[in-house]
Amino acid sequence: MRLPRFEYIEPINFEGALDLLYIHKDNAKVLAGGTDLLVRMKKGLLKPKIIISLKALKELSYIKKDDSYIKIGARTSIADIIASDLIKKEACALFEACEKIGAVTIQHYRGTIGGNILQDNRCIHYNQSAFHRSGRQPCHKDGGKICYARDASDRCNSTCQSDGATALMALGANITLVRKGTERIIDLDNFYTTDGIMPFAMESNELLKEIVIPIQGGKSSYKRLAYRSAIDYPIVSAGVFLKSSDTSKNEIEDARIVVGAIARAPIFLAKASSFLKGKKFNDISAFKKAADISMDNASTFAVHNVGSTLEYRCAMVSEMVFQALKEAAIVTQE
Amino acid sequence: MEKILITLNINDKPCEVMVYPNDTLLEVLRDELDLTGSKESCGEGVCGSCTIHMDDKPVRSCLTLAMEATGTKIKTVEGLAKGDELSSLQQSFVDHGAVQCGFCTPGMLMSADALLKINSKPDEKTVRKAIAGNICRCTGYTKIVKAVAHAGNSQDHCPDCITFSKAKE
Ligand SMILES: Cc1cc2nc3c(=O)[nH]c(=O)nc-3n(C[C@H](O)[C@H](O)[C@H](O)COP(=O)(O)OP(=O)(O)OC[C@H]3O[C@@H](n4cnc5c(N)ncnc54)[C@H](O)[C@@H]3O)c2cc1C
Ligand code: SF4
Ligand code: FES
Ligand code: FES
């Protein structure tokens, strides 16, 4: 499969990349590992005139501890995240999510965490070859006016299948976006727009610089379900974070439950999360209840467009959340 | 769009080659440099038949631009054997009958070779994980896993290891 034509530019530093984005805006696309972008380009889903490669920007590859934060450079490879003791200890959900991304030889060395959270939403009707798509009317995401995944839908319902995004949202992470002259910080809860066509609140002249995870002293876990244990994207996933109270180690003070690969963005489930506050770490029935609330709430957003049946994926929301909660609780108690 | 002259370090030899910006490393290896060992099957990162090494790490050459490979050490399946002598991994694939149609074999070898460089005696689970990104439609994987685990690490209980080491004596 040939890639469409483009001009390739390799800025030598961060400023250079920002200048290029400032000049070319919508005409340019940033290339990190390319394991999402190049596949979409091969399928003719986008045809940028200019590719701005991050190859020379070694300064964007780092994992460091800064006070009570973990800072990860956008170009850090998935392999580096998996190898980090700091991430394993303080942000276990991210470690578990990265371990499950695709397969070692696809993403782990070339793929980056920045590219992972900025990968486009997916749908079995859209992520197809140009030949396949040419046999029918284009859908909303392809510039048309219909949706094949949900009858009579006036919008695109494509699914966010990023493993990293769900884990990072559970960890309460925020990201730093930079454009020429200004920098802004936005938390992931607000970064995802729930618009299937434009999934991120990000301008075309912005570059993702860094991901920041607060170290809150709690424990996190990530579980996902996919057809095969490698290569495939998740069809449902859950990231959770649990923190015990200062006074009683067996009491949950704070909880965050996020469900992924089911809707247009990872969804933070406020009701299920707050239900757990004040509950005990060994209260398995409370975890079961929180998992069921998660399933009820997440199901209203679910769309049948990443394979498997909708009923099965919704049922598995409960199972993934339950498993993740149990695991986070066990580590907390250790 | 103009072709650009780049230098790639492939199997320890510098190669000057003219490429288009939208050429993948796989296309340049096969079509420009006649290194046709690496195969294209899916072209979209799924199957692993195009796996090569960049700086000793296994990656998909169908999802890597040739331009992105400059300045790195590239190794392809052609770089495994020393002249006519197969590497112990390649020999083990032959001995264990791990090759049927052979289309997945170059990619399998490259994923396995990268593993053996960091872990010379991997157990079955480790081997399976390392080649989890390589699809084989013929063998059912069992013989491939054995071939990798027994490469340069001959096992007394394995009939294939014994038969072939006897034959060589
Ligand atoms: C077979 C296969 C299986 C996969 N399985 C999974 C999976 O299980 N889970 C999963 O989450 N993903 C999966 N992926 C998707 C992808 O490989 C990973 O998400 C990977 O981490 C993407 O990183 P990258 O650096 O290669 O991204 P790229 O393709 O380089 O970039 C992705 C997007 O982000 C933008 N971008 C990247 N970095 C920046 C930056 N610093 N600033 C601004 N924009 C930026 C790019 O312009 C592009 O739009 C799979 C891909 C394939 C081919
Ligand atoms: S959800 Fe509908 S509009 Fe969006 S990509 Fe799928 S078919 Fe197209
Ligand atoms: S051809 Fe590269 S992964 Fe299939
Ligand atoms: S031997 Fe035929 S695909 Fe593996």
Image (cartoon, rainbow, N blue to C red):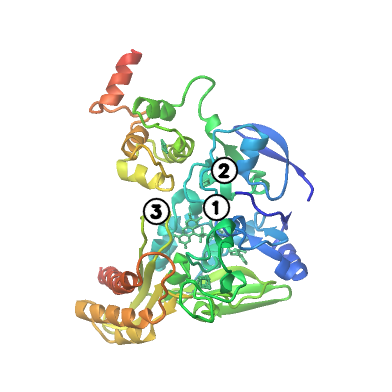
Q: Is residue A81 above or below residue B95?
A: below
Proximity of marks 1 and 2: CB atoms separated by less than 8 Å: yes
Proximity of marks 1 and 3: CB atoms separated by less than 8 Å: no
- Is A200 displayed left or right of A254 in the figure? right
Please report the residue visible at 29 percent of the width from the left and 20 percent of the height from the top.
B163
Q: Quadrant of residue A60?
A: bottom right
2 and 3 marks on the same chain: no
Reading the image, the residue beneath label 1 is A110
Residue B107 pos. (x, y %): 48, 39
Residue B108, which numbered label?
none
Q: Residues within 10 Å of mark 1 (few under 14, many from 20)?
A: many
- Tell me the distance, in whole angstroms, between the alpha carbons under discs 1 and 3: 16 Å
Please report the residue visible at 74 percent of the width from the left and 63 percent of the height from the top.
A16
Q: Tally the marks.
A: 3
Reading the image, the residue beneath label 2 is B54
Residue A191 visible (yes or no) = yes
- Is A253 displayed left or right of A25 in the figure? left
Please report the residue visible at 54 percent of the width from the left and 33 percent of the height from the top.
B37
Amino acid type at circle 1 is Arg
Chain of the residue under label 3: A
Quick check: is the Cβ at mark 3 less than 8 Å away from ligand 1? no
**Which of disc 3 and disc 1 is earlier in sequence?**
1
- Tell me the distance, in whole angstroms, between the alpha carbons under discs 1 and 2: 10 Å
Q: Is residue A108 above or below residue A177?
A: above
Residue A245 visible (yes or no) = no
Reading the image, the residue beneath label 3 is A230
Say what secondary structure mark 3 lies in: loop
Chain of the residue under label 1: A
Quick check: is the Cβ at mark 1 less than 8 Å away from ligand 1? yes
Say what secondary structure mark 2 lies in: strand
